[in-house]
Amino acid sequence: MTLPLFFRWTLAGLMAAVLLACGTPPVLLPADSRTAAPDLSAAAVPPPGSPLLATDAAVAGPALLRGNSRWQPVAWTDLPGFESDTLFDAWNAWLKSCERPGPVFAPLCPEVRRLSIGTESEQRQWLLARLQPYRVEPLQGSATGLLTAYFEPELQARRLPGAGFTVPLYRLPAGLSPRVPWFTRQQMDSQAAAQEALRGHEIVYLSDPVQAMVLQIQGSGRIRVAESDGSTRLIRLAYAGHNGHPYQSIGRWLLDQGELRDASWPGIQAWLARNPQRVNELLWRNPRVVFFKEERLGDFDAAFGPRGAQGVPLTPGRSIAVDPQSIPYGTPVWLASSGSQIALQRLVLAQDTGSAIRGAVRADYFAGWGEAAGDLAGRLKQPLSLWVLWPKALP
């Protein structure tokens, strides 16, 4: 999501501005001794089939300090499920990161590209030879964090209003600044001055104001548009800006009012079904409105999600949003999470962020698009452990 600024399907917060991939090395914490930089020549890569422990170097080196996190070196055998993950999809996500790599990972990208046609065994052995895993921990508190998920909605729309499609989505009005509050959601829905300022900025019309807010929460969506000439085409609406007001969670409001005990999206949907006359009352509790820009969505683009904060397209199931103060964009990360919704042990890439994604062990999992992805994103909220995979030649 270009400039992904949203609270996401989990109603957890808003995305921050697009940033370039960060490559600032972590700071070394004091240690009695340091491991010499390993040989990164091709000969250093062990042959396929070598035992995992063969390249599992000593992990008594220093912990690394980055922003609000501490990285503790660990053995590869500490990564749950490492030998079982299917790496092909993760490699596709890594290739995307190599389109805009930071200075730390840029030197590895030629090898990453060559290994895109390698076997899974060769890819795994390369990871062992080139990278050192570090468990991500907060400076204080538990190393177990929180995993949520987000997705890209797929919606029907019309280019012109009519036949029940009356809810507009807008382009960014000229001169609007997120630092200067503009009209609120309620004002845009009800005041003539706001509606006049928005005239001519309509991109498409949806049939449901709740869908419009969902799209704004997610920050991006796939829209099948019925054009004025009767044709239909698929486009993407990507984040372009907002009206300068803070996001307010409608789920939080329902909890505070005693209307709900379950503020998951299914719980909110059930409340809306019981209270259709209160839709505007609920939606107006969130004054923030997101504006969009239209992007063409070709066959190749449709295989990936929107662009994340790193500036590269997201890969379903292999891209995560992180706190860039803890984990730089473009970093490969081992993720382990188990709960009532899903069990995950896999290689992912840190390619996005969000204002709700704060803290050392915090991630938002890009689930993809469509109904199944939306259902997962609406329910996923469970414990999380993270390990960054950092080049061995660097501290």
Image: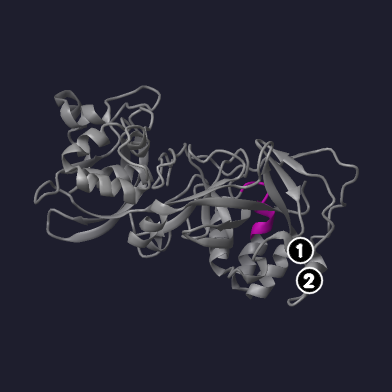
- How far is the residue under mark 2 from the one under mark 1? 7 Å
Q: Quadrant of residue 15?
A: top left
Residue nearest the viewer, comparing 87 with 53: 53
Q: Quadrant of residue 324?
A: top right
Give the numbered dot on residue 395: none
Q: In this view, does 276 lie to the left or right of 86?
A: left
Q: Earlier in the sequence, mark 2 or mark 1?
A: 2
Q: Give the range drawn in magenta.
A: 102-109
Vertical comparison of 324 with 100: above or below:
above
Residue nearest the viewer, comparing 96 with 188: 188
Give the numbered dot on residue 46: 2
Q: Residue at x 56, y 41 (%)?
A: 323
- Note whether residue 58 is visible: yes
Residue 274 in magenta stretch: no
Q: How many other residues sit within 10 Å of disc 1, few (<14), some (14-19) or many (≥20)?
A: many
Vertical comparison of 138 with 180: above or below:
below
Vertical comparison of 69 with 243: above or below:
below
Name the residue at the left extreme.
163
